[in-house]
Amino acid sequence: MEHKNYELPLQVVSKGDVMKLKRELSALDEYVREAEMRGSGAQLKSLPKTSSSLNEFSSINHLNMLKGENRESGIAFLDTLIEHAPVVRISFASEPSNTFMRKIDKWFRDNVDPYVLITVGLEPSIAAGFTLQTDNKYHDFSLREHFINRKALLINSIKGVKEQNTSS
């Protein structure tokens, strides 16, 4: 199976998540290889307990982790992601929930790139909304930026209310 067809589980959002998944898969590969060498040819019937991310990764990609070529291909795919996957940094005023981040991750993977990785930052000065940054673009969708862009409108509205109150 070519790794270009692999999918990432939605719980694997950031480059750190990919690196953790790769470490776990590499450790599993090492465990199986050592067990095969010690077992004098006896095949493994089961594997040690693995994370839900690795279970989901192997399940959605139909990988049998008992097979060395599947583990090697998975590791090579994860190495490629670590080096070349597009990364988007999204900053919020407070920590977003896992459910919310999975929805954002799904949207990016469906609409931008199936291998996009997201880094979440915290910027309390945003107040509401978010900022989004890629390698070459920066977008500010915060309430702060919205008010800055409409400062003149806000000042005129306040003056209008003040004039109405003084004329009454």
Image: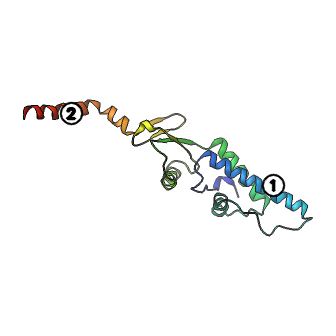
The residue to which callout 2 is attached is: 158
96 displayed left or right of 141: right
Q: Is residue 23 above or below residue 91?
A: below
- Residue occupying image coordinates x 75% and y 57%: 71
Residue nearer the viewer, 16 or 138: 16
- Residue occupying image coordinates x 60% and y 57%: 9
- For the residue labelled by badge 1, is the local secondary structure a helix, a strand or a loop? helix
The Cα–Cα distance between marks 2 and 1, rounded to whole angstroms, is: 68 Å
Q: Is residue 39 above or below residue 159?
A: below
Badge 1: residue crowd in 10 Å (few <14, some 14–19, many ≥20):
some
Q: Quadrant of the N terminus?
A: bottom right
Q: Amino acid at mark 1?
A: Glu
Check residue 124 in the rendering and tell me which mark sits there, or answer none.
none
Badge 2: residue crowd in 10 Å (few <14, some 14–19, many ≥20):
few
- Residue occupying image coordinates x 77% and y 68%: 46
Q: Amino acid at mark 2?
A: Ile
N-term mark: 2 or 1: 1
Q: Position of residue 109 (x, y in %)?
A: 53, 51
Q: Is residue 49 above or below residue 133?
A: below
Q: Position of residue 98 (x, y in %)?
A: 52, 54
- Residue occupying image coordinates x 16% and y 35%: 161
Closest to the camera, between mark 2 and mark 1, is 2
Q: Quadrant of the C terminus?
A: top left
Check residue 30 in the rendering and tell me which mark sits there, or answer none.
1
Q: Position of residue 58 (x, y in %)?
A: 67, 61
- For the residue labelled by badge 2, is the local secondary structure a helix, a strand or a loop? helix
Spot the residue most to the right: 40
CB within 8 Å, label 2 to label 1: no
